[in-house]
Amino acid sequence: MGRAKDKSGPLARRPDNSAFKQQRLPAWSPMLTANTVLPFFYLMALICMLLGVWLLLTVQSTREVKLDYTEHGACERCFQMRKNVSFAGEPCTCEVNFSIGKQFKGDVFFYYGLKNFHQNLRRYMDSRDDGQTVGRKNKLKNPSGYCEPFARDSNGVPIAPCGAVANSMFNDTFTLTYHQSSRSIPVPLLRTGLTWYTDKNIKYRNPAVDNLTLAQAFEGTVRPLYWQKAVYELDPDDPNNNGFINDDLIIWMREAAFPNFKKLYGILNRNDNVKFAKGLPSGNYTINITYNFPVQPFRGRKEVVLTTLTWFGGQNHFLPVAYLVTSSLLFLTAVVLTVVWWKFGKKGKNMQLTFQ
Amino acid sequence: DRPFNLSYLYANNAIKTSKYNVFTFLPLNLFEQFTRLANAYFLFLLLLQLIPQVSSLSWFTTAVPLILVLSMTAVKDASDDINRHRCDRQVNNRQVNVLTDGELKKEKWMNVQVGDIVKLESNHFVTADLLLLSSSEPLNLVYVETAELDGETNLKVKQALTVTGEMGDNIEALSTFRGEVRCEPPNNRLDKFKGNLTVNGQTYGLDNDKILLRGCTLRNTEWCFGLVIFGGPDTKLMQNSGKTTFKRTSIDHLMNVLVLCIFGFLGTMCFVLAIGNAIWEVKEGSVFTAFLPREAGVNAALSSFLSFWSYVIVLNTVVPISLYVSVEIIRLGNSFYIDWDRKMYYPKNDTPAQARTTTLNEELGQIKYIFSDKTGTLTQNIMTFNKCSINGKNYGKHSKNMCFMLLSLQKTQRVDFSWNQLADPNFIFHDYSLLETVKEGNPEARAFFRLLALCHTVMPEEKKEGELNYQAQSPDEGALVTAARNFGFVFRSRTPETITIMEMGRKVTCELLAVLDFNNVRKRMSVIVRSPEGKMTLYCKGADTIIYERLHPSCKKLMDVTTGHLNEYAGDGLRTLVLAYKDLEESYMDGWRQRHHEASTAMEGQEEMLNELYEEIEKDMTLLGATAVEDKLQDGVPQTIEQLAKADIKIWVLTGDKQETAENIGYSCNMLREEMKDVFIVAANTAFALEKDLELELLRTACMCQTVICCRVTPLQKAQVVQLVKKYKQAVTLAIGDGANDVSMIKAAHIGVGISGQEGMQAVLSSDFSFAQFRYLQRLLLVHGRWSYLRMCKFLRYFFYKNFTFTFVHFWYAFFCGFSAQTVYDEWFITLYNLMYTALPILRLIISQFSNSFSFLFQYPQLYSPGQLNMYFSKKAFVRCMMHSCYSSLILFFIPWAAMHDTVRDDGRDIADYQSFALLAQTCLLVVVSAQLCLDTHYWTTVNQLFVWGSLFLFHNKTLNCGLILLFFSVILGTARNSLNQPNVWLTIFLISLLCILPVVALRFVLLQIRPTINDKVRHMVGKEVLPSPAPRRPPARRISTRQSGYAFSHSQGYGNLVTSQGFLLKRPLKGRSILFTQTDSALAENKPQQYRTITEEVEESQSSHSW
């Protein structure tokens, strides 16, 4: 290159003799030989099979109950009621009964699930103000334009939290009751500690409270249109679980990637009652539902899920099965490759260089 | 005078090759950049993204890469332009003497005006296009070198009009000189000028001989005065340096087509998704309005329309902005490798190889036809006096094994010419006996060298006493005269009537009575001289066949012996000449001269009459001997040609030389072999063949043959032949040459290669690649070409693969997100995906991936052939690429979907949320894409591995590292640490990698077993290190048969008529070579017996000598 080097003399323009410039870097040239490929395929097939079996066993060990309560039994009434917007303010509760044949050992997680609810629509996902939920004062009163049309109410008062996501927050509530002989024991659920650490502590903050109460901090804002309670009253039991750092809100605001999703509602509190120290005993249960969230308009379904977990997560059979299938496919491929190699490649006849 | 001329607003002499100045740079450069399709497209995208209803991605996703690309290009353009500015300034500030107000003043070039009179001195560059007024040399001659203009280094003569020449260097006369020049407007024809000069009411015609063109250099002339006619941009030099046509590689064309296809494809995808959106909006969206009200005035149809454009934005990565940039960078890298290559560096004249065009190097791997010049390209254009036969005695070494002998001889037996002060120190001869013979005073030997010293048209140039320089019309003559000089017969000087030689230290001036000049029909040249003793002799040299017919019968015996020698010489590929002489009677000579004078002044039939006269006198001559001149091949030419032939590259030699010479070279460089059946030699009359109807016929015949040699072709025809092949064969062509006459061919071919040799820089300047020796071509093609091509193809395949995979995932996701143009990946990931994560490793990797031993490339030139067949990247490969990425994207989307949509973290918290899914999807994508890259890399070096892992690391750094987290604060914070510590996420990644990579491995393995490519085979062999040693090279077959080499004069007619004609310096100054060309051509057109012929072996054997 034209860089003026201080070289002079007869060979001034001779290129440097570095390994890089002369393309002589040491290199390793891996080649697909039968010695490497075939064992590799067999090995992979084996690994996949082992993984698959192991995962399957793991998944099988989890227990899960799923209940679609959209129009289930008593909820039919509420379902019909929520069809009509004019009854939106009227409370409606219903009960769903189920029984567990075998004990749910260990931690039990309580989820609510929604189907056909598109939290992943582009405009829906954008309709939020992260600046507001992180507690910025100016954003609290001046929600970002992305929140439209849920940025301000009809009087122009800013909404907190603003946006379509927050506005559509799931607002059914559940209580779980265990029936032992004739006695009904409420099942204690932990309603906090359900979120990611980073969400609870970094991404969601209440506006600076100083000496004020939370309600005062939120003064000058209104609750989202569809909400029945203000954001600082979401959890009547735990004052520290209110405002933007409310677990239910945070969980809802973490939008699901797909239209069918489930979100954590609570975790069985095993320390509260000896009965549940080891998990959920077998028997009959009732879930009391405050049926608020309308799903009928968009043909959605609602469900509750009770499940135990392993290191692998919930009861998802896909990965174990996929591993098993992959394993068998790999094995088949390996056999085919072996045959091909045996028939064609082994003698290396094809590898002969024949030049005319 | 100046003010008057200034009133006409002629262009002044300042030149400007730069494009921008400080103020215009930004707007002009930006405008230029946006005229490129890719940039315009991305500007359009950027504008789309600024519409909030459409914008599915933040504006920075497009803006960041666009700005990067634009600024990189702008920086490059700016630095180029600064260089041009610097060049301009340097040229514009050169000093020249200008005659103003009656005295000479130094002026800068740029201040020279049309109408100024400038004084040039020896070795000065000509300032502008000048009308020559007067000069220091007699007869107002000046000598100029036009190397910068047309690459020819021989001196040209220009002559001023007598009327102006009379002024000499009389400053007063010059400054009061008034004249009016009328001429044609500025144009770019170097060899034509029309105009007239009016002085004192008298009009004189002006032609090209009176014009000094800018770019020439004044030589051997003390000073001259010139009147500026055209300045600066109007000069012929600048008019010529017009726009060079931009060469594009076939991959470029393919890429353009593909990009158009991709546009179509993008449109289709977006259309499908828009339809989907319409359906969804009607069925689902309309009932979801409670949660997500529609924007005012938007209904399903409008929404679908908007979503079309939104998807144009989301899926824009199928038309990758970085593609063009990356391609350019890769090419640049490959060019650097060429520049850096030590094995293409020629230490003798300190010339490294140079990739002058950086955009063509992958085409080097696809060459199918090479068009080569002969002189200076295959040969060194150095003639060496090698052997001679004097009076039946053979001097010079008998070479059974020439190379070997030469090597050993060089050390031992180089003849010492130090006794001769005038000897040329560069002359090498290896036979002492000859010198001894001469010194002994052997009359034949003396006559032999006297002939060589007298019978020629060489012009001597003696700047200092004893420092002789010969300006020879053909290098053959130069070699012969130089030989004579070293053996003590030094040609010192000539006038029209005399020739002065130093005969063994004794000064002898011979009277030159006549020169019987060479032409193509005569194939001989004679001079008639009168020695100081008064003896008149005719000396003649010429082609053996011609001379033999005209010898005295008494020489019969000598003829037989000499014939034997001639055959031997011809067999060695030497160019031979036979020398003869004849003593003349005074009385006869008087009569002959009388008739000669009559004939040469005759108005009609002058040529025939002269010919007759010549025939009459050139007979009954006495044979003196024969010379053999070696047209030295460049080193390694035969081997290179053999290698290239093995690589299935067809080599056509296009030369202006005679057929015999061309054939001879063909033999000596291994292109023609005795055993070859189909050899095709096209002679000058290609002109006929190049006419429409015969074109195809010519091509068809030519392509059936292994070797094609076209001789007697003009520069234009060279280009036509190249065009012909380009047009009908759809093959990639390469033209290689060194002289100005190759420029047209170099420009016409896909790739032009210039040899930076003796013939000036013209060819190099118009070439795309240049180096010093023909043999480097093999490395350029077989190593650099192949690698560049492979790199480019791999890069393209991989690039399309990675971008399609990336984009298709969005497509699949559309079916889950209500066709709302939601992206799968995080916006910053999208922004940086092409720029950083994959472009970096790919660049590094592609650039240094073949770092392995070169030797097997030369052992198996066949490795080159896949490139010629477009095997590595074509439309088919592209479709395969698309299918592959389609498969990969299916895996990459649906496996994470299935694995994640219904699961949670091990502590029950969310993992199926959008951000986690995005993270998982993009991690998988990166892993798969990097793994694919490793798989595609045949040669793993530490550097490229570093880059692959580096980019993966960078990705994780981005998502994990605290410093960067701030940047991604609101978006993806905490996602990585919350999902990447989950075993099921890693199990998913592992499964996806297996499913994406293993099928490819399996397929490749099967193909390797069943249908291994030549690459695989060689790699297999190399891997096993069972490479057989290369077959012993067949020693170049020595030709026993014929002497086509018969006559060795090179192409053009000599200066003969000039040398003798009394008024030669007055009436007919020397003509440029181009004119001589047309002369020879017409001479040839007169005898056009065969158009082309096929020489078969049998013919070869029997044809002792067919000549033209």
Image (cartoon, coloured by chain):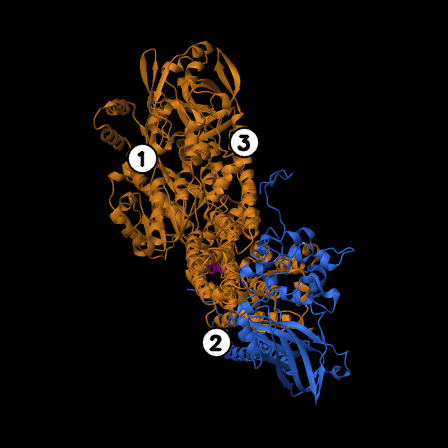
State whether residue B713 appears in this view.
Answer: no
Spatial CA distance of label 2 from label 1 is 64 Å
Quadrant of residue B716 within the rendered picture: top left
Spatial CA distance of label 1 from label 3 is 45 Å
User: Element at badge 1?
Assistant: helix
Q: Main secondary structure of the magenta part?
A: helix
Amino acid marked by disc 2: Phe
Say which of marks 1 and 3 sits in front: 1
Q: Position of residue B863 (x, y in %)?
A: 48, 60
Q: Position of residue B176 (x, y in %)?
A: 42, 10
Chain A is which colour?
Answer: blue
Q: Is residue B771 above or below residue B221?
A: below
Disc 3 designates what residue? Answer: B419
**Are the residues flagged by discs 1 and 3 from a single subunit?**
yes
Chain B is which colour?
Answer: orange
Q: Position of residue B266 (x, y in %)?
A: 44, 58
| Label 1: chain letter | B
Q: Which residues are magenta?
A: B858-865
Disc 1 designates what residue? Answer: B1078
Amino acid marked by disc 1: Thr
